[in-house]
Image: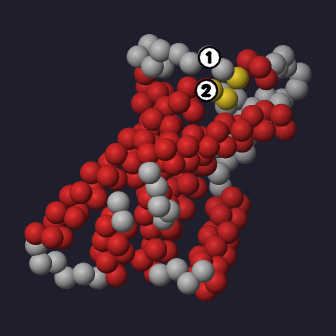
Amino acid sequence: MLRFNLTPIFLFLIIFIILFFYLYKRKNKTLAYLLFWSIFYFYLINVIRLTQFPLFILEYPFEYNFLDYINFIPNNPFGNNLYTSVLNVILAIPFGFGLPFLIKMNWKKIALSTMLFSLLLELLQLTAHLILPGHNRMVDINDLIYNTLGGIIGYALYKLFAKIFKIIISKYDIEMNSVLAYVQKIVSTD
């Protein structure tokens, strides 16, 4: 069994440091932007940890048909898979909420971005099946559907947050720091 232990954590931390300094020095991103980017980065790493690990590797000999681990047929979310459906929606809500703080988004872009992110996760699971026969993760169209729904819900929550934030800023005399000024800039472009 391969776990998300110190080796992948160290690797993702090195990637984080390199990207952080690249964005700060080369792309001249503000510290407020980098704060939101860092939060989003660690969210993505945790999604990878939850969806890809641990990797179970069964010992040969065993009967293994990797097609048994692929589902292309959408199912009823209120049937036996309600728990999994809800978890997949919840997993992607931060994606739809957080991405607009980094990139200008609209409904179509957030749906497409979430779907592509979910597809990437499913393709990583498929790759694990091809490289590590005996891997036990399902490649499932339902994950793609419910993750996309979660991203859209997250974006709706972002839009609600933006409206509330604008009302609070206009109604009350709040001292702006760099983070609040960044949020105000982002939500004012919506």
Rendered view: 59 above or below 46: above
Q: Is residue 160 left or right of residue 7?
A: left
Q: In the image, what residue type sits under mark 2?
A: Ile
- CA gap, disc 2 and disc 1: 7 Å
Query: Could you tell me if the residues under marks 2 and 1 are in contact, i.e. CB atoms within 8 Å?
Result: yes
Q: Which mark is residue 73?
A: 1
Q: Residue at x 31, y 67 (%)?
A: 188
Could you tell me which quadrant the N terminus lies in? top right
* Residue 96 vertical placement versus 122 (above, below): below
Going 48% across and 27% down the picture, which residue do you hit? Answer: 84
Is 172 or 129 nearer to us in this picture? 172
Report the residue marked by disc 2: 141
Where disc 2 sits, the SS reads helix
Task: Where is residue 154? Give x, y as percent.
Answer: 39, 46
Provide the secondary structure element on which disc 1 rests: loop
Q: Nearer the viewer, residue 120 or 59?
A: 120
